[in-house]
Image: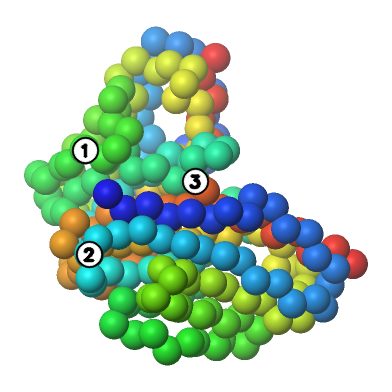
Amino acid sequence: AQKVTQAQTEISVVEKEDVTLDCVYETRDTTYYLFWYKQPPSGELVFLIRRNSFDEQNEISGRYSWNFQKSTSSFNFTITASQVVDSAVYFCALKLTGGGNKLTFGTGTQLKVEL
Amino acid sequence: DAEITQSPRHKITETGRQVTLACHQTWNHNNMFWYRQDLGHGLRLIHYSYGVQDTNKGEVSDGYSVSRSNTEDLPLTLESAASSQTSVYFCASSDGGTQETQYFGPGTRLLVL
């Protein structure tokens, strides 16, 4: 069975610091998709990125970057020069291509960015 | 703009009552999902549907049911609400295919007293 682990329950940083959110996944499948979602204090879930298992290229989008390493089954998320608006709960999720379209979520990391 | 909506956004009910949470999407997506979010558990899948008349159980389906009579709606029913069902409920939808992304509704906060 698949599993997603986000070992960091809560992280606090000061604005402008860089912060990395860890995500480790487990699956026996060779093809799968990984996702990051953001849940701000308002409560909605916002899609950030999707990465398939064949594509290990890192991705950068503005202050956000993602590091996918198949060898360590990790899909880490880095925010550069954090801002107060980045304060949210961040979820990593896994979807198998052969297991229907169901997402398996990690338990989330609460990020607090303070002035 | 296409969207996914949930109603009500907040609900208080009593133990034993039947409760229905609505989910409506205008993306014409085939796939729809219901999750519950609880502290320490992340989001867990309750039920899902791949199209009209199709429904499937997720990992925490006991005490819940869904029906899919059209593409746009997937209502979630709590047959006899229990305090353990106090949670935040999210509906999501995605297009067909294995690589599609799920997009989530705003959530419904349910309190069962």
Residue A14 in the image: above or below residue B16: below
Q: Amino acid at mark 3?
A: Gly
Look at 54% across and 72% down and name the residue there: A76
Residue B68 location, quadrant? top left
Which one is earlier in the sequence, the residue at label 1 or at label 3? Answer: 3
Q: In the image, which is nearer the foreground, mark 2 or mark 3?
A: 2
| Numbered disc 2: secondary structure | loop
Look at 36% across and 58% down and name the residue there: A26
In this figure, which residue is indicated by the disc labeled 1? B57
* Residue B106 visible in image: no
Q: Chain of mark 3?
A: B
Q: In the image, which is nearer the foreground, mark 1 or mark 3?
A: 3
Q: Chain of mark 2?
A: A
Q: Chain of mark 1?
A: B
Q: Amino acid at mark 2?
A: Asp
Task: Report the side of B45 relative to A9 (left or right).
Answer: left
Tag shown at residue B113: none
Task: Report the side of A103 relative to B88 (left or right).
Answer: left
Question: Where's residue A109, x and y in %?
Answer: 61, 55
